[in-house]
Image (cartoon, rainbow, N blue to C red):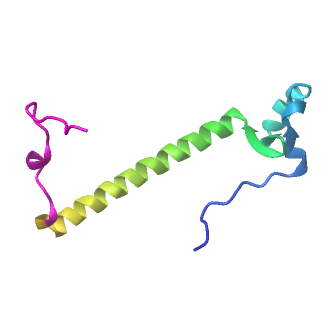
């Protein structure tokens, strides 16, 4: 099965070493307004410098997708319960009461 997530691709001008960020931060900040900038540390991807508007869009989209996923998961579980009510256990049978004690280890 192919991995549905792929690594983002960065062009050479979008990659900078961490030791160069201090010297060129203003330039990098300006570049990040146009496209993400990958900061590496010891030749390993470390941090992405991103325009705030892009960040907000990503955050909003992620939140939206999480909400959709949670809603579909709840709908799936409700449908499963409705189709197989005999396979469920009522909450009152599994909930703890103040008299319940933790098992000794």
x 85%, y 44%: residue: 15
x 42%, y 52%: residue: 68
Residue 24 locus on image (x, y percent):
90, 28
Question: Magenta residues, as a range?
Answer: 87-105
Q: Is residue 72 above or below residue 103?
A: below
From this viewpoint, which residue is outermost toward the front?
Answer: 105
If the image is split into quadrants, where does the N terminus sit? bottom right
Residue 72 locus on image (x, y percent):
36, 57
Majority secondary structure of the magenta segment?
loop
Residue 97, by quadrant, is: top left
Image-based side of 73 in relation to 25, left or right? left
Residue 5 locus on image (x, y percent):
62, 60
Residue in front for this viewpoint, 12 or 90: 90
Image-based side of 31 in relation to 6, left or right? right
Residue 23, by quadrant, is: top right
Residue in front for this viewpoint, 15 or 63: 15
If the image is split into quadrants, where does the C terminus sit? top left
Q: Is residue 23 above or below residue 100?
A: above
Residue in front for this viewpoint, 42 or 51: 42
x 61%, y 41%: residue: 57
Q: Is residue 26 magenta?
A: no
Q: How many marks?
A: 0
Image-based side of 98 in relation to 78, left or right? left
Residue 96 locus on image (x, y percent):
13, 39
Q: Is residue 97 magenta?
A: yes
């Amino acid at each position: 099965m192919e991995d549905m997530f792929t690594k983002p691709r960065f062009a050479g001008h979008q990659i900078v070493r961490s030791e160069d960020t201090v010297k060129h931060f203003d330039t990098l900040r300006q570049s990040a307004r146009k496209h993400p900038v990958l900061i590496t540390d010891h030749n390993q991807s470390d941090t992405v410098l991103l325009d705030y508007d892009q960040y907000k869009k990503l955050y909003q989209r992620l939140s939206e997708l999480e909400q959709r996923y949670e809603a579909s998961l709840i709908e799936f579980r409700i449908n499963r319960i409705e189709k197989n009510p005999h396979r469920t256990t009522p909450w009152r049978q599994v909930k703890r009461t103040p008299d319940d004690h933790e098992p000794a280890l």
